[in-house]
Image: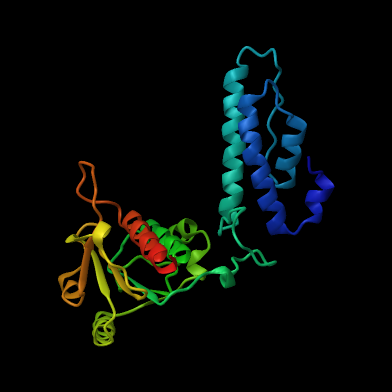
Amino acid sequence: MITKNKLLSLNDFTRNKKCANILFQLSHKALEEDLLDYDYVNMILDVCNYKPIAKKSAQSKSVQLSKRSDAFYIYDVAQDILSKLKSEKSDFDYLLSSGELDISKRIIQDKILILDEIRSPYNVGAIFRSADSFGIRKILLTEKSANPEHPHSRRTARGCIDTVEWEYIDERDLLKFLEEQNKNNKDIIALETGGESLKNFKFSLNGVLILGNEELGIRPVLLEHSNKRVEIPMGGCKGSLNVSVCAGIFLCNWYLSSIE
């Protein structure tokens, strides 16, 4: 077990990240073990400036209820610490010494993603996270799309707002951009119902993908400028998927086709 002195010797980001991971593990032990090491738990909580939890007796009649309560509290503290770190990095992330994501680790391909009036900051953040993982060079957002800098976008993206290049673009400039892509024989793919099945689609090494509004889909003016239309085959009773889920499915397939 890591000591208090060792924790205090770490920089703020590393110490808080370490404490969050320890508390996450302890939240499971609070349910699994007969009696938690409350001295150790409270030491971690003290280092992070959270209130301690009262020691419980193994003979307590409400020990099971107390264990659940302790587990929830410890887990909530771990989540709160990660939220305050803002980027909420994973243990498997590639990080610089500053704690920021190491952009040099990204495989960046000549692929552009257009978000057409994606209004949910959660969806925007989730799409950025998939874009970071699957080679997207740049994201263009139409003016009514949610701001990637919104706290909900940033929290969902977990640092990827800063690893993928992006900008807002007005409709006139966007149409000019799409016309240029067409002139250069680039695929402009509309991910929309009624298109070719993703199962049979032949991916190019580069191009543009358009994602549409959660309720209404891609606007007609942009559909007219696309030269490919693709839909994701499904086997459920629902006729559509969340736009960020659609993005992840398509981008993963596009990425895999490019590296095989």
Tell me residue 2's x, y (percent).
79, 43
> Which image quarter holds the C terminus?
bottom left
Q: Nearer the viewer, residue 213 or 183?
A: 183
Residue 103 at what x, y percent from top left? 56, 71
Q: Residue at x 84, y 48 (%)?
A: 5
Horizontally, residue 65 falls left or right of residue 175, namely right
Image coordinates for residue 91, horizontal then vertical, percent: 62, 53
- Give the residue at x 58% y 47%: 80
Q: In the image as oriented, which residue stretches furthest toward the front? A: 260
Location of the N terminus by quadrant is top right
Relative image position of residue 136 (x, y in whole percent): 42, 70
Is residue 82 positioned above or below 205 on the image? above
Residue 199 against residue 22 in the figure, above or below = below
Q: Residue at coordinates 78% horizontally, 50% vertically from top-left?
A: 7
- The residue lying toward the viewer, choosing from 49 and 126, is 126
Residue lying farthest to the right in this orientation:
5
- Closer to the camera, 238 or 125? 238
Q: Quadrant of residue 33?
A: top right
Instruction: State left or right for residue 3 relative to residue 193.
Output: right
> Residue 210 occupies which quadrant of the picture?
bottom left
Task: Tell whether 251 sits left or right of 84.
Answer: left
